Image: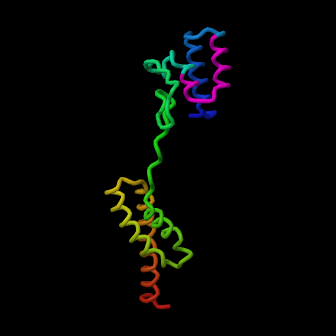
Amino acid sequence: MRAAQADRDRTLDLLRAAYGEGRLDEAEHQQRTEMVLRAKTYGELSQLVADLPQGPMGMPPMQAAPTLGPTQAVPGTFRPLPPPAKTNSMAVGSLICGLVQPFTFGASAIPAIILGHASKSQIRTSGEEGDGMATAGLVLGWLGVAFWLMVAFFALVVPG
């Protein structure tokens, strides 16, 4: 797999740390630095730091993996990031309905509440992200309902 500039930067950081700890002499550090800047793949980068610890805990060195397939991850610091968690779309809808209430004169307060409760239920069962958005939509929805009930109360009870 092709390496990005961020991967080269991480490798350079490892080399700098190894040089600072006395694991590499100046000539070897310079040589490896030049090779990092020319490296195109994760395999090339991992070979350049395979004999060095991969962090402050002094973990065992990475094993060089020059023949990795496209779906395999390189061990150590070059693992691909896990995919981001999916956000519940009803939670997003609840928050949006809660936020647009001033523009809809409170008409979106009830949908914000309904979507908020439904999304919280789905989030509990599915493990999706978005609990904070669902809560914010619920709070805004209930505040909108309370506001319009107070307006109606003052319009009907208080003589004008």
Residue 29 within the segment the image draws in magenta: yes
Q: Nearer the viewer, residue 133 or 102?
A: 133
Q: In the rendered view, would you say 154 is above or below 45?
A: below
Answer with left or right where residue 37 lies relative to residue 101: right
The residue depicted at 46 percent of the width and 18 percent of the height is 61
Judged from this view, the residue extending furthest toward the left is 125
The quarter of the image holding the N terminus is top right
How many numbered marks appear? 0
The residue depicted at 55 percent of the width and 20 percent of the height is 47
Q: In the rendered view, would you say 109 is above or below 7?
A: below
Q: In the rendered view, would you say 72 is above or below 124?
A: above
Q: What is the chief secondary structure element of the magenta stretch?
A: helix
Image spot of residue 96 (x, y percent)? 51, 67
Image spot of residue 36 (x, y percent)? 63, 23
Which quarter of the picture shows residue 27?
A: top right
Judged from this view, the residue extending furthest toward the bottom is 159
Q: Nearer the viewer, residue 59 or 102?
A: 59
Q: In the rendered view, would you say 72 is above or below 157?
A: above
The residue depicted at 38 percent of the width and 63 percent of the height is 119
State the extent of the magenta-drawn residues as a range: 28-46
Image spot of residue 52 (x, y percent)? 51, 16
Image spot of residue 56 (x, y percent)? 48, 21
The residue depicted at 42 percent of the width and 80 percent of the height is 149
Residue 34 within the segment the image draws in magenta: yes
